């Protein structure tokens, strides 16, 4: 039976673990945020930093088995907790085309297994990227050239991070390049980007910036020490401009995965 509320972790639906699982509610808590402020001389304060720390999602469910089947109820709770324990990419039916990377912070507890009307809950938390994200990022690819620009539309309602790849199309080594996105510039020197290699600027699952070179065989090496300038390419929703320049011909691809407050 397809339920009104559905939840999947890394593509595995919770209600497919056992047909007795009935998801009753999926609740998103208010995000945990921190604000830092500095006092003003004439009174009042000035906001110096505002950060979203985490976002919790609670899944509440029941188990449709007779009260005499206490051992089966225990088995189902164990199976649900096993599904939840590793966390992963959470997708829920009420947010189509959205995803949230979560960890499990509160497993389900069976309580009294004789109580067949009991409700249970799982609590997941998003920490590294505490926003729902667009399932498929917007992507744009520019022409093969030593310099150029492309525009892309950032969806969502919160600040997000752009990612970019420069592929060396010249067949010769590239030592210097620069990329500007949303008015912020990263410059690279002594890059050592060989023909057919790609400079990849992206983020890991915790949201940490990575700057790497990918060779034709798919092996990465770090290029973080080659960078100067901007710490990251943070952009607001709306039109985003990306420009680049390099010693030789490259092809630039920029992508933006919208985030939703």
Image (cartoon, rainbow, N blue to C red):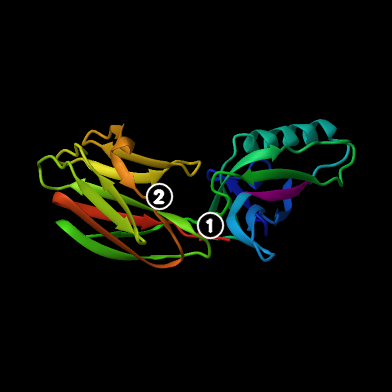
- Residues 192 and 185: in front is 185
Q: Is residue 62 above or below residue 68?
A: below
Q: Measure the C-alpha gap from mark 1 to mark 2.
A: 23 Å
Q: Main secondary structure of the magenta part?
A: strand
- Residues 254 and 20: in front is 254
The total number of labels drawn is: 2
Does residue 166 appear to the left or right of 21 in the view shown?
Answer: left
Query: Circle 2 — which element?
Result: loop
Frontmost of labels 1 and 2 is 2
Does residue 23 appear to the left or right of 207 in the view shown?
Answer: right
Q: Residues within 10 Å of mark 1 (few under 14, many from 20)?
A: many
The image quadrant that residue 95 belongs to is bottom right
Q: Earlier in the sequence, mark 1 or mark 2?
A: 1
- Residues 95 and 139: in front is 139
The image quadrant that residue 143 belongs to is bottom left
| Residue depicted at 52% across the width and 61% down the height | 158
**The residue stretch that appears in magenta:** 54-63
The residue sitting at the front extreme is 41
Q: Is residue 84 above or below residue 186?
A: above
Query: Is residue 61 found inside the magenta-colored segment of the image?
Result: yes
Position of residue 153 measured from the top left corner of the image (x, y, whole percent) = 38, 66
* Picture disc at residue 232: 2
* Picture disc at residue 98: 1
Query: Circle 1 — which element?
Result: strand
Position of residue 93 measured from the top left corner of the image (x, y, whole percent) = 61, 58
Q: Is residue 21 above or below residue 258?
A: above
């Amino acid at each position: 039976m397809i339920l009104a509320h559905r939840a999947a972790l890394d593509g595995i639906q919770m209600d497919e673990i056992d047909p007795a699982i009935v998801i009753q509610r999926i609740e998103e808590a208010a995000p945990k945020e921190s604000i830092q402020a500095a006092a003003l001389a004439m009174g009042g304060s000035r906001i110096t930093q505002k950060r979203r720390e985490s976002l919790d999602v609670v899944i509440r469910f029941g188990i449709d088995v007779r009260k005499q089947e206490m051992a089966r109820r225990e088995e189902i709770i164990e199976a649900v907790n096993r599904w939840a324990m590793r966390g992963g990419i959470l997708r829920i039916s009420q947010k189509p085309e959205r995803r949230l990377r979560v960890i499990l912070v509160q497993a389900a507890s069976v309580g009294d297994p004789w109580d067949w009307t009991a409700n249970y809950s799982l609590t997941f938390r998003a920490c590294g990227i505490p926003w729902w994200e667009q399932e498929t990022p917007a992507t744009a690819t520019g022409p093969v050239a030593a310099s150029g620009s492309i525009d892309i539309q950032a969806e969502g309602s919160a600040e997000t991070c752009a990612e970019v790849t420069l592929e060396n199309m010249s067949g010769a080594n590239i030592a210097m390049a620069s990329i500007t996105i949303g008015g912020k510039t990263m410059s690279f020197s002594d890059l050592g980007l060989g023909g057919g290699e790609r400079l990849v600027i992206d983020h890991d699952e915790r949201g940490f910036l990575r700057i790497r070179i990918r060779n034709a065989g798919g092996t990465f090496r770090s290029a973080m020490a080659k960078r100067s300038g901007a710490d990251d390419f943070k952009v607001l929703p709306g039109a985003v401009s990306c420009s680049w320049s390099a010693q030789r011909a490259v092809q630039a691809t920029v992508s933006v995965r919208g985030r939703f407050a």
